[in-house]
Structure formats: C-alpha cells, structure tokens
Image (cartoon, grey):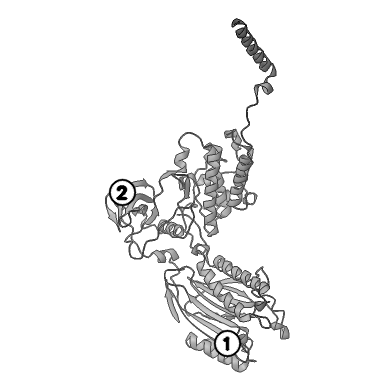
Amino acid sequence: MARSDHDLRIEAGFATETGKRPDNQDYVAVCLAPLGAGALHGVVGAVADGVGGHKGGRVAAETCVRAFMDGYYSQPETLGVARAASRALEAANRWIAWQARVDPALEGMATTFSALVLARRTASILHIGDTRVYRLGVGGFELLTRDHVLGGGEMRHVLRRAIGLEDALPVDQSSCAVAPHDRFLLCSDGVHGALRHADLRALMAERRSPQETATHIVEAALAAGDGDNATALVIDILDLPPSDESALARLFGDLPIREPPKIGESVDGFAIEERLSDGRYSILMRARDEASGAALALKFPHPRIAQDASYRLAFVREAWAAARLRSPFVGEVIELPAGRQSRLYSVMPFYAGETLEQRLRRAPELGLDEGVGIAIRLARGLAALHRCGIIHRDVKPDNVILVAGGGLRLVDLGVCRAPDLEDFALVDAPGTASYMAPELLAGAAGDEASDLYALGVSVYRMFCGAYPYGEVEPFSRPRFGRPKPLSARRPDLPAWLDAALRRAVAVDPRERYGDVLEFAFELENGAARMPPPPRPAPLYARNPLLFWQGLSLALTVLLAISLMRR
C-alpha cells in the first residue's frame, strides 16, 4: 500500500495472526486520508490489543482504532496534530469505558493502543499499554514507547494503563523529526514478547517491502512464541516535503499575484462591481458570482507584496484558517472548486454594514445595552477561533464588521497563529500596538490570554473612545501602570462593567479571566443584575408640604367655583 499526499510519500504493509488462541483480539489499520481532505492531518497507523481475560477485547481494540481514526480526521485541521489526536483518543476512551460499565456483554472491556501520525516532516506517537512503536533510521533501531505494565517477569503481562480502564486517559504522547528511508514498526505484545530486540532489528533491516517484512515478523513471532495473537504494521518513509517550504504554500500551490482587476472586469466568473477598500497589503472588491448571482467580496493581495514571502504567507494563512471555521460571529471564506482560481485572492460573502471603528467615529456614544451586546457577540466569535486552536492576534474595532440587522463578524486572520503551522518572521510583532498585551510587546507569540486582552481594550475603547493605558506608539516599549477607570470617562456606566474590563486588561495574564467566554458570562450576568430604572417617587413622598399646599389650593378653587354658580 503506497501513497503520495502533498509530497509525503509512504508505503505500508501489515499482518496479523490468531496463533493458538481461540480468537484474534488484535486490530491493526493504516489510514491514508482522501486527497484534498485532511491534508495537514497526514497518515495514521495504529495497533490495538484487546485485554485478555475480559469480555469484548476484540470489540475494544477495533472500536478504539476505528473511533480514533474517524475522530482524528474529523477534527479541524487548525487544531494541529497533537491536540486533534488527543481529542479523538479521549473520546474513544470515554465511549469504551462507558460501554464496559453498562453493557453486560462487554463488561470490563479494555485495550492497549499505539498510533503513529505522519504529518509533513514529523512523526507523532500516542501510546497506552504494552503495544509498541519502533523506528529504524540512521540512528539505529530504537524503541519509541515504554510498556505500561507492573514490572518484569510474570508481572510484565499485567497492565497498569489501558484504554477503557478509567475515564481519565493518562496517555503518552511524543513526536520526533523523520527523514526519508526511516522505517517504523508498530506491533502487539505477541510480537515483541516472542522476538528479541536484535531479532526485530535484523528483520526490519532486511529492507524487504513493508508487506513482506510485516508477514515475516509475524511468522517469526508465532514460531518463537507461545501462540499469542501476533500483529505487525510496517511503514516506510519514501519522501518528505521540502523542509524550507510552508505547508500552506504547498496547499495553495503557485497561484500568481497579479494587478487587481478594474471595475467592470470579470475574474474567474466573478463580475467586479465596486472597490470597497484599498489597504497597505490588500484591496477589497465587491463582486457578483456570474453563475449564482450571489453578492461577494473578493480580497486581492497588492502586487507589491508578491516578492515578500511573509506577507504572501499571511494572506494565504487568513484564507486557509477562515475557510475552516463555522461561526455566525466570524467572517467566512469560501473555498472555490479546484481549477477555478487563476490567481491568488480570497472569496467571502458580502457583509453589508460598517466596521466597529466606523461606528465609534460617529455620534452618539454607544449605550450600555448596545455596547454589551456587541462585546458578547465579539467574545463568542473569538471563542470559536480558540476552540479550533487559532489565536487571532489582531483583535480591534477595525477588524469587526457590524452587519446590518444586528449581526457581527470578526475578520482579518492574516496574522493568526495555529498549531503546527509555521509562524512567519515579521520585522515587528504581529498586531496593533495599542491593543497588544504586554507579553506580546515583550516578544511572546500570543495565546488566548493575549486575545482576551485585545478584546478588553476594544470594549473599553468602544465605550469611551480611549485606551485603558493610553495610546501605544508602534516600536515603543511602554510601561504599564494602572489602567484609567472607565468610570472616570463614562460615569454613567455601572461599576460592574468597570471591574470586568479592569480584569480583562490586567497586565499579568494570570489575573485575567480564564477565557473569553468567562468574560462574556460576566458581561451577560452583569447586564442581567442591573436594577430596573427607578420610578419617580410621587410628589407626596418627595415634598409633602407642596402636595398639601397644592391640594388645598385645588380645593379652594373648586369651592369658589361652586359658590359662584349659586
């Protein structure tokens, strides 16, 4: 079985035999993701060995491998290999542990598990139990996992950890760089328990095809062992992507950067109707799909950045990340069918409205209810990014679109950060100085806490038009003291909002909220706790003397009128 996907070329083969046991409780699989889908997820190989002496050992082994692979490839590519793989395995573990408790036919079922994920130039390993992963490379033949057993001798068969034994999953995770011609072996204890390390090394070093090697290893284990199930999976690395080439650049190919189209021209079936903005690095055009009639926005990079690899990568990164997000509060990027795009640009729905920055520049000031509503929607959009492992790094009112009808879209992911994607070296730190957390200005890469800080600064400025620590000049190194209270600028706003913003923009990240949703929760509950506007007290309560004087006057007038009519 061979495969080439985005320059990662592998060949794999496996074998599994029951031996003298009544059934085979091992399960082995290798998954080559469909071309174009999960391109950054890479190739997955896994071996599992159902725990003997329990019901459902084979069910546990097969379920674990299949659920892990299905779950891994269904995770957003933005999460990166380590986080996506952990999520998938944790979900498989929870399901197996639950079934082992509630289904009498599967009572106590559990399994060992070892997986190898090959993505770009890295091998990632997840392991629990006593299945094993080996590598044969320039450094020799090495064991990459450790057995989770009680000890040597007779105790070497007693597992300390396995999938399904408990809800919490203490899994070993590691990664290593790979090179062309590296060879990996994943096997069950029926193999490594029967063959010595030197025997396995000799069989792997014969350099037969992976299928032949796996077959010979299993046959040798059955001949030398006690008849236990024996399983081996062999994967050869034939070729790797170039080390100096971005994964995103490979995905988007060599689309050229050309002069932006003029109004009235057509680009790949999109009729250009209006120029919406002309920025330093890109031009935004309103267009209409000539086939569907849909109103769209097309973003073209400026030709002057064509030779700047960093800014080209930023443009591609934004399109890639936004196309993989689904949130009503984040700007969408539409992926085009293969072959339609003749140049580099990105396609988005056209959001009719204005930026939050434009709203702040006109009267009147935002009131409490309107401002809190915007802040909560913006926090939810940022939370959607964080769930996918993406750090925005440039949250500010200019990157928030207030859509007509009350919607909101957080846009501009050009300097976002995502796991397993090469960050790019810019002369200055990514972001806008006045919204950057102190740790970003000190050189940190950015995380959820720094995004929360930028959100807090944006909300603070949204209510009062100023910055909590004053405006920060680019390339400066400001000293952060105490933020100016919001109440000093907007005494009409409640104290709870002032306190929430002080915590969101705390200088020390540890003093901020745990995440943006906690901040949103505080805003929602603060607004809910607001007492209703006080009703004016009656005149009798406010000024009893004036009340009785007025009443006496009214009675006197009525009495005079009555006497005049007689």
In this view, 234 is above or below 455: below
Q: Is residue 36 visible?
A: yes
Q: Quadrant of residue 229?
A: bottom right
Task: Check disc 2 and report its element: helix, strand or loop.
Answer: strand
Report the front residue among 292 and 207. Answer: 292
Look at mark 1 in the image and give the residue it sits on: 200
Look at mark 2 in the image and give the residue it sits on: 273
Count of labels shown? 2
Kind of residue at badge 1: Leu
- Of labels 2 and 1, earlier in sequence is 1
- Residue occupying the point 48% across, 47% down: 408
Q: Residue 540: horizontal and vertical position, in percent?
A: 68, 21
Other-residue count near label 1 (Cα within 10 Å), few / some / many at <14 / 14–19 / ≥20: some
Q: Quadrant of residue 1?
A: bottom left
The label shown at residue 110 is: none
In this view, 337 is above or below 111: above
